[in-house]
Image (spheres, helix red, strand yellow):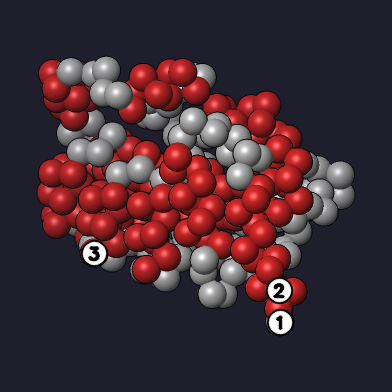
Amino acid sequence: MDFPEDFNQLELLDSHGHLIPRGSSSLWTGSKDEEEELEEGEHSEEWYLQQEEALKDKPKELLLWAAENNRLSIVLRLVTADPLLVHCCDEDGYTPLHRAAYGGHVQVVSALLAGGAKANPRTIDGWTPLHSACRWSRVAVASCLLRHGAQLNAQTNGGLTPLHLAASYTNSSKTDSAHTLELLLSQRHLQPGLRSSSGETAGELARRSGPHHFLFEMVEDCVNVV
């Protein structure tokens, strides 16, 4: 997919981030407030069982749904029955690993990786699971993915690295936002100078819009010493 020189994917995330495609069966269709409500577990067990029943004859869709909704037992059952299911994806290229990553479901992520899921599948927009984890400050998931070979400096079609996405998360009330940046900035092979399609580094982005720009000083100090 080609992008014009002045394309700014981060501005698009700021204005339409809640509309990032997650497949036809996704529950995530609204605002950040709705996202937080879903994370708090507003659905009853009966509701989950109904959803599972509705998808029981569609193992691919069921696995994608289960990964997104942290239904570990279903994930394990499906992957055990058909190991190739770990490689399935929705119409936007999101795999079960992507869905578990942006949901912050560490046990599901671990189960999928143990079941043979690749650490660096790409969506149609070039997002890896690490991009998804870092965009929503899922620090435990990001750490798990990095231990399993996730590409630290992978760039989306718009040139965004996981570090760009972590730096663009401006909700200072979530401590995991800072922790995610600290995790990425502490990685030995990080390339903090990579620029997005709009010509911006993650550090420049953080100074412009993020509450944790001071964390980039550790990288800048190391560069100055070298």
Give the residue drawn at x 47%, y 59%: 183
Tell me, yes or no, whether the two marked residues, 3 and 1, touch with CB atoms within 8 Å.
no
Q: CA distance from mark 3 to mark 1?
A: 39 Å
Q: Secondary structure at mark 1?
A: loop
Task: Judge whether residue 98 can be spotted in this image.
Answer: no
Question: Residue flagged by tag 3: what amino acid is it?
Answer: Ala
Q: Is residue 152 left or right of residue 204?
A: left
Within 10 Å of disc 2 (Cα), the crowding (few <14, some 14-19, many 20+) is few
Q: Is residue 6 left or right of residue 66?
A: right
Can you name the residue that lies furthest to the bottom here? 226
Task: Name the residue nearer the viewer: 86 or 172.
Answer: 172
Tell me, yes or no, whether the two marked residues, 1 and 2, touch with CB atoms within 8 Å.
yes
Residue 60 in percent (x, y) is at 29, 44
Q: Report which quarter residue 118 is drawn in.
A: bottom left
Q: Which mark is residue 226?
A: 1
To which residue does mark 2 refer?
A: 223
Q: Secondary structure at mark 3?
A: helix
Question: Residue flagged by tag 2: what amino acid is it?
Answer: Val
